[in-house]
Amino acid sequence: MPVKVTWCVLAVAACQLVAQEVRDVSYPDFAAPVGLKTVGAARVRNGVLRLTPSRPMERGAAWRLEKLPVRDGFETAFRFRISDRNGEGPGADGFAFVIQNNGPNAIAGRGASGGFAFGHAPADRNRPAIANSLAVFFDTFQNIEDTSGNSISICTNGDRKQMSWPPPRLGVNWAPRVDLKDGATHEARIEFAPPLLSVYVDDELAVRAPVDLARMVGADGAAYVGFTASTGEGFENHDILDWRFRPRVSSIAYTVGTEISFSKFDCLPTKSLCTPSEALVEETAPGEFHVVLPAHLPWSAAIPNPEGRAVEIRNARGTACWDVAANACGSPANRREDAPGGLRQRTERGRTAFAINDRDYADNQGYYEFEAVLGKPRP
């Protein structure tokens, strides 16, 4: 069944609703892979999507030709099988589920690169990664920088100037219970309930991390979705047996206000969610201030309030995470100051300061953004 999505396209002081239909993707097998583009060594044979054959120095990819909505959440699941292990390892290097906005011909390095990351094999050393992508990597070989040869990680690539080896890992499980290359059929399920991306294998949580997909997709919140894989001196078959994808979208999505965001800041490279290095406070009118409040800094934003007026918070938005393991992320929609993640304020010495409620700030990620408006003078 198609899901009708109504997107709000926001221009200055204007909001236009645009209807769009989004269909679930379902491949019970790949006997008729309509809408799927294979790249490199990837082939569809006998109803199976083989990303790479068991041969050295191969790379392959497969992408859904139409962009899929991912920014606002999704669920996807697929069965995979890794077999015919040979060479170093034996068997290498793994495969990945990838989200990217480069197009349906995207592919990256061989060897440890998994087909999505910066080139890391003699055949294509330093080949660019798939820029601004997110990958869930099912890694089957232990390289020097790895803790094991059987791991599941959530990785990201920036633009070409930011690419590095190994790709930044937003989260990693070095010892999942599943043996990825035991030749058996396994099922992976990936859920994105912004801002948390959770990866399950055989119904067991393998890894979870906060992810800022808005920085990796187009303005419409959609991206190309698919798989990559690679081999090196070790090699194996990387097979995807089926695949289904369902977007999680609300019926109406819109932002109230005349501007989406000031966005006059850079995001810290050490945080998974976009986290400004410092607070931003800008007076937009007499007694009215635009505030960007980083989650990892306590009481870092303050506005002048010499008369001790009440301060009204308007148009609050944003996301912050303070305990990823406990699935603890939130937004300023919760106006209780004493609640975890609540937006707090205090007035003293002629200033009103703001903080996101927490006890230990250093590991927090994300930010809140809002307008702070001074009330009338006290009688």
Image (cartoon, rainbow, N blue to C red):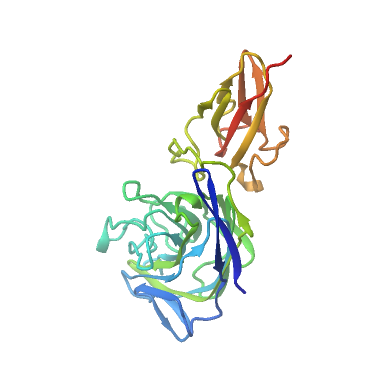
Residue at image point 71% right, 32% down: 337
Residue at image point 37% right, 55% down: 131
In the image, is residue 48 above or below residue 252?
below
Q: Is residue 49 left or right of 360 when viewed as pictured?
A: left
Residue at image point 54% right, 66% down: 179
Residue 86: x and y in percent read 38, 73
In the image, is residue 172 above or below residue 59?
above
Residue extending furthest toward the front: 14
Q: In which quadrant of the rendered image does the N terminus lie? A: bottom right
**In this orientation, does residue 177 appear?**
no
In the image, is residue 369 above or below residue 147?
above
Q: Nearer the viewer, residue 172 or 361?
A: 361
Q: Nearer the viewer, residue 372 or 113?
A: 372
Residue 181: x and y in percent read 49, 70
Q: Nearer the viewer, residue 89 or 379?
A: 379
Residue at image point 51% right, 59% down: 152
Residue 273: x and y in percent read 52, 44
- Quadrant hosting residue 22: bottom right
Q: In which quadrant of the rendered image does the C terminus lie? A: top right
